Image (spheres, rainbow, N blue to C red):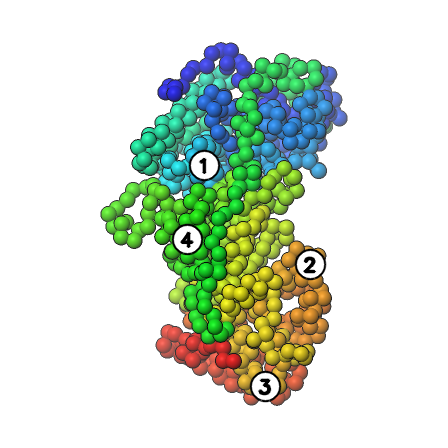
């Protein structure tokens, strides 16, 4: 193997520069041109798009990096994919993707000729066309970059368990200012050089964001170098603006980095010692809008923030701008790059890799093609024994940890568990019996006593939900499987990341050539109703409100009330594709309600009457009590018992909801109940008390179109709480059994007067429970230890 990078000959530089000019011509053409793509005639005003936004600033740097990596793919037969972090950077990627031929293969009407190029130009960032980011429609993309900050974490997720893959990721210097990007530089402490691939970051310093300088471009060279050395990288610098000099420097530097990656991997794999290396990275400093107009109306454009959007913003109204546009486009000399039919010249086309080695055709960037179904143990083997509903307690997530442990053992090359330092807290620590926590930073002697650290670990823990989510997304999008758990109050850290991934999945479903990928499975635990020592800051169930904003084609929400329902739901989610499955279930001890057979049936339906908790068989109920969530279910059942004890003639129907989307009409979500089924369950005119885990208005939002919505009364979290016992917190938010009984008396006509004495006793019990909690620091034992009596 070559140990030193080679210097390019002048002919090689000329060819690379010609290819780069072709890329830049295509990028500029995408932003401006409708017709006459090869400019054989003078440009006409009707050939120019009327654009409010153009996306030129980062494009030359992206294509510059892309084509230099292509050279090394050819030279060393590399298996590589390319991620573009800069926002609106698609032209810099679409150009080389088109020149490689993959775009035309994917979209035959965008053929490799003048007609196809014209279609290609017309559809860019135009109604009915493609976006200005590397969207799912872009061959070779697993990272859109619509929201900045996730490129490096996505790249590492793609590299895990892909030992021969190099993921080249260009990081925009504006993007580098985001919190998710800043934490993701630490991903190098989690990359095992033996079993994983490599990530080659290229920090692109073009100096500016929309109209401000970027921080990393305005600090001294030594400070910047020390910053990345401090992160644990070996930074290499390529800086300048002269194309010939920059081609030579980039070729040598990128080759040196690739050779260094191979050396690191070979040494680790031959020695069997997975030590943490100082992986190489590149800092590429080039002008913003490189090779574009240097000045417009006497104001600096190239190398300044004005290049960020439309370099020439008044082309259709200003003849001088129009002439400047034509001169700029002609400066790339397209007649030297394309033949008369608009095809790239054969000697230039030969510079691109072939077949699946093209980054635009690499199957890792269409991970569903590589996805293999998990080997799954039978979830029944982990079931909690339930001989009588509501009489025994168990930690809901503990059996799930054992289930995940054995899934890990059966899938040691394509399954990982992710969590921000919380797997033990979340009672999932049995997973460490199958695999430890990935750790390639330093070790201390005491780590051997319960640290659960290993360079070969497959449990990914870092106190950055951003980085974990990015790793998981990259891992899934390249064909693998994963499971993520986190505290409910702080899952909001990844609200935006969830949004972006949901949008990616929704768009991917519209792209026929995208193969289905494994679902993103998210367990939300340490929930709002069990935060007695953490207090108000840890009480926020609002992530569910964020989830229901996204496309019903890709979102699912489950609230299993006990162990066996959680196992059933998790089994289903881990076998699914192209969804984001959100599972809400607390980690503490809770009453167990269903044996495994009953749980499977209940979860398959997603919603159902619990006959054992109802006494309305054969008659129309006087009252419907429904629940979704573990604590709300317990309190609702306790309310049923109090009502039956005080009003034996009252007919009560009890309904439990596992699949939250069952409440919405079938026209709005694939899981929605038909109106007839909903009416059968919830009646047409009887009062409904719904005890809900989250904010109460979410249930109204889902069910507002239902026939009996006017009689639907939802109890949920109302932003009331601090350092509370569980029951006191429930009382404050009125989801407790006593509040439900009072509400039932108020809603059932026959009880409004007759139930006055019972209402008084319920209020007395609330006062007694509060006083006991304040005096003893725990809940009243006879209430806290309540079990189902029938």
Label disc, if present, on residue 153 of the rendered structure: none
How far across and down, in percent of the image, does residue 714 sit?
Answer: 60, 69
**Which secondary structure, mark 3?**
loop
* Observer-nearest of 357 and 154: 357
Whichever of callouts 1 and 2 sits on the residue coming sooner in the sequence is: 1
Measured as percent of width and height from the top left, residue 85 is found at 52, 35
Tag shown at residue 405: 4
Q: Are marks 2 and 3 in contact (CB under 8 Å)?
A: no
* Residue at 60 percent of width and 34 percent of height: 138
Label disc, if present, on residue 647 of the rendered structure? 3
In space, the residues marked 1 and 2 are separated at their CA atoms by 41 Å
Task: Determine the CA span between mark 1 and mark 4.
Answer: 22 Å
* Relative to 91, 436 lies left or right: left
Query: Which is nearer the N-term, disc 1 or disc 3?
Result: 1
Image disc number at residue 666: 2
The answer to whether mark 2 and mark 4 are in CB contact below 8 A is no
Image coordinates for residue 438, horizontal then vertical, percent: 37, 45
Task: Name above or below for residue 670 compared with residue 215.
Answer: below
The numbered mark, 1 or 4, whose residue comes first in the sequence reads: 1
**Secondary structure under badge 4?**
helix
Label 1 or label 3, whichever lies nearer to me, is: 1
Residue matched to label 1: 162
724 up-or-down from 507: above or below:
below
Q: Are marks 4 and 3 in contact (CB under 8 Å)?
A: no
Q: CA distance from mark 4 to mark 3?
A: 48 Å
Q: CA distance from mark 2 to mark 3?
A: 36 Å
């Amino acid at each position: 193997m070559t140990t030193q990078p080679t210097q390019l000959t002048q002919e090689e530089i000329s060819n690379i520069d010609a290819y780069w000019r072709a890329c830049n011509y295509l990028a500029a053409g995408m932003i401006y041109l409708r017709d006459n793509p090869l400019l054989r005639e003078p440009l006409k005003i009707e050939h120019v798009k009327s654009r409010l936004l153009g996306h030129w600033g980062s494009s030359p740097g992206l294509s510059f990096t892309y084509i230099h990596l292509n050279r090394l793919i050819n030279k060393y037969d590399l298996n590589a994919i390319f991620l573009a972090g800069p926002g609106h950077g698609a032209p810099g990627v679409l150009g080389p993707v088109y020149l490689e031929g993959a775009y035309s293969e994917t979209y035959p009407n965008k053929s490799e000729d003048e007609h196809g190029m014209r279609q290609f130009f017309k559809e860019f960032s135009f109604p009915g066309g493609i976006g200005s980011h590397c969207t799912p429609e872009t061959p070779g993309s697993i990272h859109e970059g619509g929201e900045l900050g996730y490129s490096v974490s996505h790249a590492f997720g793609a590299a895990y368990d892909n030992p021969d893959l190099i993921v080249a990721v260009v990081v925009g210097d504006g993007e580098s200012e985001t919190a998710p990007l800043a934490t993701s530089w630490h991903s190098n402490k989690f990359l095992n050089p033996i079993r994983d691939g490599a990530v080659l970051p290229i920090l692109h310093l073009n100096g500016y964001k929309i109209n401000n300088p970027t921080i990393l471009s305005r600090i001294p060279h030594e400070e910047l170098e020390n910053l990345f050395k401090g992160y644990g990288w070996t930074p290499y610098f390529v800086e300048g603006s002269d194309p010939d000099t920059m081609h030579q420097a980039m070729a040598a530097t990128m080759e040196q980095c690739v050779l260094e990656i191979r050396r690191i991997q070979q040494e680790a794999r031959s020695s069997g010692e997975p030590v943490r290396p100082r992986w190489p990275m590149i800092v590429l400093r080039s002008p913003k809008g490189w090779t574009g107009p240097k000045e417009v109306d006497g104001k600096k454009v190239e190398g300044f923030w004005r290049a960020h959007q439309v370099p020439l913003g008044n082309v259709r109204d200003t003849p001088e701008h129009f002439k400047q546009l034509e001169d700029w486009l002609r400066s790339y000399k397209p007649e030297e790059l394309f033949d008369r039919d608009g095809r790239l010249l054969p000697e230039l086309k030969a510079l691109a890799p072939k077949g699946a080695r093209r980054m635009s055709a690499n199957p890792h960037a269409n991970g569903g093609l590589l996805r293999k179904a998990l080997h799954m143990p039978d979830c029944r083997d982990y079931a909690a024994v339930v001989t009588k509903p509501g009489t025994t307690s168990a930690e809901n997530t503990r059996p799930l940890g054992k289930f995940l442990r054995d899934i890990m053992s059966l899938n040691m090359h394509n399954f990982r568990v992710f969590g921000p330092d919380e797997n033990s807290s979340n009672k999932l620590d049995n997973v460490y019996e199958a695999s430890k926590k990935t750790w390639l930073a330093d070790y201390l002697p005491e780590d051997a006593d319960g640290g659960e650290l290993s360079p070969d670990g497959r449990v990914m823990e870092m106190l950055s939900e951003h980085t974990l989510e990015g790793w998981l997304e990259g891992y899934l999008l390249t064909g693998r499987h994963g499971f993520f758990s986190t505290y409910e109050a702080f899952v909001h850290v990844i609200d935006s990341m969830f949004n972006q991934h949901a949008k990616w999945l929704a768009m991917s479903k519209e792209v026929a050539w995208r193969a289905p990928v494994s679902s993103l499975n998210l367990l939300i635990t340490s929930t709002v109703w069990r935060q007695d020592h953490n207090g108000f800051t840890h009480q926020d169930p609002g992530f569910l409100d964020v989830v229901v904003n996204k496309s019903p084609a890709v979102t699912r929400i489950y609230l299993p009330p006990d162990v066996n329902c959680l196992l059933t739901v998790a089994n289903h989610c881990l076998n699914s594709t192209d969804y984001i499955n959100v599972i809400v279930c607390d980690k503490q001890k809770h009453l167990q309600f269903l044996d495994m057979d009953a749980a499977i049936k209940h979860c398959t339906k997603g919603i159902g009457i619990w006959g054992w908790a109802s006494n309305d068989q054969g008659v129309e109920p006087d009252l419907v009590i429904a629940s979704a969530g573990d604590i709300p279910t317990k309190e609702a059942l306790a309310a049923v018992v109090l009502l039956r004890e005080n009003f034996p003639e009252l007919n009560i129907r009890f309904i439990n909801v596992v699949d939250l989307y069952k409440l919405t009409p079938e026209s709005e979500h694939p899981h929605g109940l038909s109106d007839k089924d909903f009416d059968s369950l919830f009646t047409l005119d009887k009062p409904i008390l719904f005890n809900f885990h989250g904010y109460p208005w979410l249930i109204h939002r889902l069910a507002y179109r239902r026939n009996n919505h006017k009689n639907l009364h939802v109890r949920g979290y109302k932003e009331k709480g601090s350092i509370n016992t569980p029951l006191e917190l429930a009382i404050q938010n009125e989801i407790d059994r006593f509040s439900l009984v009072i509400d039932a008396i108020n809603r059932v006509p026959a009880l409004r007067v007759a139930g006055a004495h019972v209402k008084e006793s319920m209020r007395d019990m609330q006062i007694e429970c509060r006083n006991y909690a304040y005096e003893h620091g725990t809940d009243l034992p006879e209430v806290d230890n309540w079990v189902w009596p029938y």
